Image (cartoon, grey):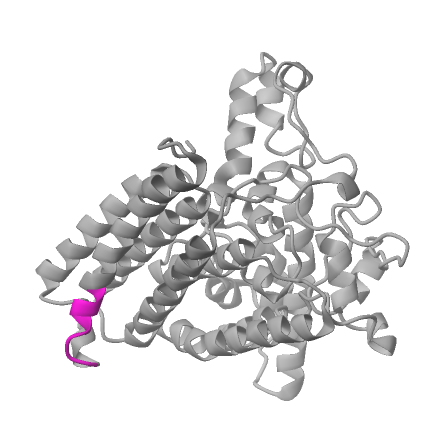
Amino acid sequence: METYAIALSYAIPGFIVLILLEYLISRWKKIPVNEVMDTISSISSGITNTLKSLMGLTVIIISYDWMVDHIALLEMKSSILVYLLTFIGLDFAGYWSHRFNHTINVFWNRHIIHHSSEEFNLACALRQNVSAIVSIYFFLYIPLALLGIPAEIVAFVAPIHFFAQFWYHTRLIDKMGVLEYIIVTPSHHRVHHAINDQYLDKNYSEIFIFWDKLFGTFQKELSDQPPVYGVKKPVHTWNPFFINFMHVWGILKDAVRTKNLWDKIRIWFMPTGWRPDDVKLKYPIAITADPYKREKYKTESSFLLKIWSWTQLIVTIALMYYLLISVGKLPFIQIINYSIFLMISIFAYTSLMDRHIISIYSEIIKLGLGIYFIIKGEGWFGIDDVLYGLTYFVIGYLIVSFLASIYFQFIERKYVTGTLKPIA
């Protein structure tokens, strides 16, 4: 976990710089690729995924270490060739896990967050799940284990392979010549994120595009069919926690409502989006039929609320960064407590972005929990060792955050709309 935290402490500043660079270039080229609330939601989602990893919330059924120890047929030594083989093996596993996530109903819940943005930019690459709490694709790593590739090499290559998927989430790079035949390019991945019928369930590859061509899932970007991004059933929220679990909640409701016992069982493993006939008739769901007529999700957002939402995101990133560089010094229970606090904070301000009344209750919990941790720990998780007095900054932030939510949910809404009733 400490190694992972150190890697992220280096990667996160790089991600932020690239996101800012993309924004500046998009302004220069007059190609709008960012929407304020969407970008904040995307980056916040990335933070929740990081916190999930730090908390160790992923249950591993069979670890790669165990497989290497028990089924390896060969014994590989460290070499450039072994590292390259590992990278290709991880990419093969990534293709199939990605494809399973798209095509099996319950597994789509693990991936919907990544596709939920109705924009396509570097920030949306950070939309990663908190809902995949069970590691189910261990069997895809059996070929690597049979070859006897050491676990430490897989552990080293895996984050490189993952981070290498960040750059191609952009609309600012057009076709890339000969590279279109070798690696996944922005053009290939724009197709993958599109909801146009022509583009659905195509281009699952993560680094090398030849997997799609080999297994019949390749589709090139067509000039006469501009991609429209998002999911067929729009999520209509900026809250990453709602997005992470809304699909499985929908499946559960359908499983309860259907009268057919077989449908109650098979709905979980049918193709993504499948619903029993009786439920489909009685409880219809609006699906985007024509992507070019779809209206993007927007909320009542004043300029001041947008500035406040950015402030919340910046403070959250700063607090998370302190957690990352302190992982080696903090007891595990404090890492858990700190992560829970940040998750509640993200839940609160993204709910406020939705103008949902639950943001007020979340802020109350956040304020109480934050003060409790400060009193119990005689400061904010040792942050005063970095710079004396920073705990007072955290206290001030907690109070201002609570008061700001009251203002935006009630006072500003009364002034703008003439009603005290927040969106429920």
| Left or right for 354, reference 257 | left
Relative image position of residue 76 (x, y in whole percent): 59, 80
- The quarter of the picture where the N terminus appears is bottom left
Which residue of the protein is positioned furthest toward the bottom in this rendering? 79
Picture residue at 22% right of the left edge, 59% below the top: 333
Magenta-colored span: 387-394
Q: Quadrant of residue 307?
A: bottom left
Relative image position of residue 421 (x, y in whole percent): 37, 31
Residue nearest the viewer, comparing 374 with 256: 374
Picture residue at 41% right of the left edge, 38% below the top: 356
Image height of 27 relative to 237, above or below:
below
Picture residue at 61% right of the left edge, 18% below the top: 283
| Left or right for 145, reference 349 | right
Residue nearest the viewer, comparing 190 with 24: 24
Image height of 40 relative to 387, above or below:
above
| Left or right for 67, reference 119 | left
Image height of 255 relative to 369, above or below:
above
Q: Is residue 128 visible?
A: no
Relative image position of residue 336 (x, y in whole percent): 27, 58
The kind of secondary structure the magenta stretch mainly shows is helix
Residue nearest the viewer, comparing 352 with 179: 352
Relative image position of residue 110 (x, y in whole percent): 55, 47
- The quarter of the picture where the C terminus appears is top left
Which residue of the protein is positioned furthest toward the right in this rendering? 224
Q: Quadrant of residue 332?
A: bottom left
Picture residue at 35% right of the left edge, 33% below the top: 420
Image height of 9 relative to 230, above or below:
below
